[in-house]
Amino acid sequence: MCKRNMYFLKWLASFLIIISFKPVKNSDFISLISIRNDNFCITNSSSAMIYKRNNNLQEKETTFLPRIGYFCDFENSENGNCIDSFKVHPWNLVNYLNYESTFLLDLRWERLPVKKLPFKDDNYLSFLTLVKLGGLRDFKVPISLKGEEIHLLLCDKEKVEEANCYWFILQGWSRKYTAMRKCKVGGILPWDHYPKRDDCAKRKVEKVHSEKFPLYSSKEKWSHIMIEKKANTISLKLYNERKEEDIIDFTEKDAKMFELNYILGHRKDEEVLCKVHENNYMRSTTVSEFTLNRAFTGSGIESCISFILNTCSYCSTTVIFLNEGKTKVILEQNFPPTNGIWEHHKSVTNISSSIFFWVKLKTMLTEGSSSTGSEFWSFDNFRACHNEEYRITQSSDGISECQLLEDNKKVEKVETIDSVTDDIICSSPDAIGSSCISCDLLQERINNKKCEKLQICEEKNGDTQCFCSSGYMGSQCNEVCPKGTYGYFCQKQCAFCDPVGQCDAINGNCECHNLFEGPTCQVPKKGQYLEIAPKVVDQKADSCEIQWDSENYIGKPKPKYYLVQYSNARSSWWNDYGEVENLEKNGNVVVGNFRSNKQYAIRVLLSDEKDEIKKLQYTNLPAAMCMTTCNDP
């Protein structure tokens, strides 16, 4: 049996191939963008973003793109203008310890100070005050931890040698146990490394871990733990993917429980980092409505207000945009209850940048609900925003990995690959990534208006896919596409340019052949052609069957006629096959009289005028490649 000749002629590679990448507007993405030695993490998520720099995790605050104006986070008590705009009855400025102590895994987490738990100081055991509880009867304190053996002490006094403490040890004794000790005054002496009283040395509660035990906290990533006291029970709970898992519980059976005024931190040998989720915010427990004591202006062609909201399970919130005179409602948008979890929200309306408007907040109970005395509405980070906005790292040197804190979604810098799934490619050469981030917008941060020589890495189904910005190739994305090609992966061919094959590597723009027009010279001045080459659906020793979609054409008006042409491998001359025929929606033709085991190119000419069918025959139109089979006996 003869073998098929799979040789493709070089001249056939110059035929026009048009590949369409449709952008997918992902609701939650993270990307790593690199240019030379600068690397940036960027996201559209409200989750906190962390990154690995020089092999260490970093958690510096990110900045917004585009830049934002008004911002009120209620953390700085000296910011009177901000707080006074909201501090209107019945709204009050409160602290997390007194009310809803929930995890802050959104962008507010980035500004929480990082504390290093101590081990020794001048050979004395050292303890760091993490939280001052102020004698609260019940409390919930959310903490993020990164490390392995972690010691958390709940004490009545700040100096451990003078204190009664409940001493929790996470993953101690070579990661074999998590336990709790009850230590009375004198049980913990910093100058002696072991508990001095029998009651302190004894483990009141312990949990034994297997060898393959998944660590509650590790050196590789941040974990989130809730310290909770309710009545006479103290609990440590792990928070993961918005679910709580019990780590250890202790119920005090003695008549008098230690008074708890401080939470202290300590470590054993290796570094442990800690963040306490402390914040101030505005809170109300009453159905009400009030207008903020400041006017806003639109940004461009739209106006956007953003805030982080936390409400009871039957408490809803409405944001109302009023005109400059406060006489007309421009927009009214209702937000459902958040069930005790902080959620990020936006209100957007079409108000130009030259118009002032006011914002009214209205709180209410959901339909069918009545007051129980447990209702609350809380909000934080009230700011001006943009409908399409991103956050990007301020640091750029040495970043090798980007990560979203809340779901641990991450992307790491790897070698550029030759192709990726279509849904992370933007169809516009003036934007990049699955979210089509504008190159003009990126210029604010990376000083690269045309997105030239960028490497983009994105997460896809748990894996990282990296590719170059349009017009570039190579492992460092610093090589311009070869002559005659352009676009992502240099997969598109320059269209009908003059000179032939000379077009812009990024967008394909060029000077046009006299029969074509448009920025990329794809549109014929007169006539039409198939946008995509016909598909070969069957091959025999003497024929090839092709199929095409008559609706997939370029040019105006709609074509009415077609003519099939073919060319063999040893000639660049096109031969007509049959006569000019009337065009149907889906064409299907068997092209015959071929020789066996030979390569042929087949194309279809289109026209709305029968006598103009060959007007474009001397241009490189899309063609199908067909290899006839062997004519075996």
Image: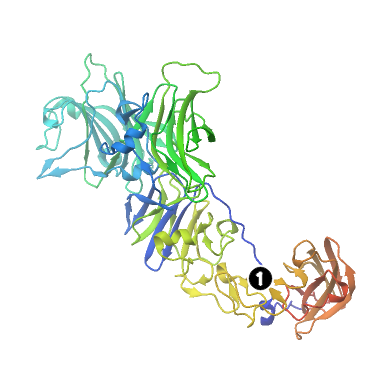
Asked which secondary structure carries label 1, the reply is loop
What is the quadrant of the N terminus in the image? bottom right
| Viewer-nearest residue: 374 or 244 | 374
| Viewer-nearest residue: 22 or 259 | 22
Residue 400: % across, % down: 38, 59
| Residue extending furthest toward the bottom | 570
- Which picture quadrant has residue 399? bottom left
Q: Residue at x 38, y 34 (%)?
A: 293
- Which picture quadrant has residue 421? bottom right
What is the quadrant of the C terminus in the image? bottom right
Q: Residue at x 31, y 41 (%)?
A: 145
> Is 441 located above or below residue 115 in the figure?
below
Left or right position of 5 against 39 = right
- Which picture quadrant has residue 483? bottom right
Residue 194: % across, % down: 14, 35
From the image, tell me which residue sits under label 1: 518
Left or right position of 507 against 151 = right
Residue 320: % across, % down: 50, 33
> Is 216 located above or below residue 337 in the figure?
below
> Is 569 located above or below residue 126 in the figure?
below
Residue 477: % across, % down: 47, 70
Q: Residue at x 41, y 32 (%)?
A: 244
Crowd tier of the residue under label 1, counting other residues whose Cα lies within 10 Å: few below 14, some 14–19, many 20 or above: few
Q: Identify the amino acid type marked 1.
A: Gly
- Residue 333 appears in the rendering: yes
